[in-house]
């Protein structure tokens, strides 16, 4: 199966009170890998990884996260806390009927994916932090 560099068109998911743009490559029955972009990026940051992993048989999924790209941008600052950001990903899995996924995050997306096993361990098959170490929670919100 040749690897194409064409970035997929988005489809939209209602999750956790927002409308999220989601880009996918690969077979629907492939093992799911969810890619979370950093700041100030978009799902497009994963334009090389989605087609390559899709061609390798994985279900590669990259959302524009809350506040970015074609996804909704709630006004209140509180709408961007870690509970909402990880809840968006759980809602994404629910909508796609996925039990568990590997979560890959870069930059700010890395901080979000490191929180997934702490908050939603039953939905996480693995975590990959790209340029983002796991850190303790800061002493203030």
Image (cartoon, rainbow, N blue to C red):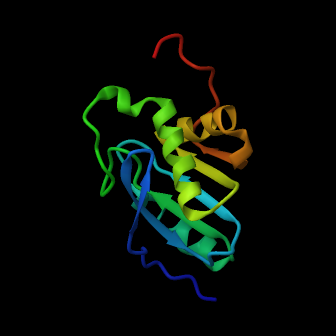
Residue 34 horizontal side relative to residue 16, left or right? right
Residue at the image position 33 percent from the left and 53 percent from the top: 71
In this rendered view, identify the residue nearer to me: 32 or 99.
99
Q: Residue furthest left?
A: 75
Q: Is residue 86 above or below residue 36?
A: above
Q: Quadrant of the C terminus?
A: top left
Residue at the image position 58 percent from the left and 37 percent from the top: 132
Q: Quadrant of the N terminus?
A: bottom right
Q: Is residue 128 above or below residue 70?
A: above
Q: Is residue 120 above or below residue 99?
A: above
Estimate the x, y position of residue 98 in percent, counting from the top left: 65, 60
Estimate the x, y position of residue 119 in percent, counting from the top left: 64, 33
Q: Residue furthest bottom?
A: 1
Residue at the image position 43 percent from the left and 79 percent from the top: 6
How many dots with numbers? 0
Q: Is residue 60 above or below residue 131?
A: below
In this rendered view, identify the residue nearer to me: 47 or 102.
102
Residue 63 shows up from this direction = yes
Residue 78 horizontal side relative to residue 127, left or right? left
Estimate the x, y position of residue 38 in percent, counting from the top left: 44, 44
Residue 107 shows up from this direction = no
Residue at the image position 69 percent from the left and 76 percent from the top: 57
Estimate the x, y position of residue 11 in percent, counting from the top left: 40, 69
**Snapshot quadrant of residue 33:** bottom right
In this rendered view, identify the residue nearer to me: 11 or 51.
11
């Amino acid at each position: 199966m040749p690897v194409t560099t064409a970035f997929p068109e988005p489809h939209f998911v209602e999750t956790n009170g927002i409308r999220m743009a989601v880009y996918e490559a690969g077979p629907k029955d492939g093992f799911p890998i969810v890619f979370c972009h950093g700041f100030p990026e978009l799902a497009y940051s994963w334009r090389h990884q989605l087609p390559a992993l899709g061609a390798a048989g994985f279900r590669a999924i990259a959302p524009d996260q809350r506040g970015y790209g074609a996804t909704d941008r709630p006004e209140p600052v509180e709408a961007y806390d870690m509970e909402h950001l990880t809840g968006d990903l759980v809602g994404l899995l629910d909508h796609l009927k996925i039990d568990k996924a590997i979560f890959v995050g870069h930059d700010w997306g890395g901080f979000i994916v490191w929180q997934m096993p702490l908050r939603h361990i039953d939905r996480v098959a693995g975590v990959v932090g790209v340029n983002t170490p796991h850190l303790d929670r800061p002493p203030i919100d």
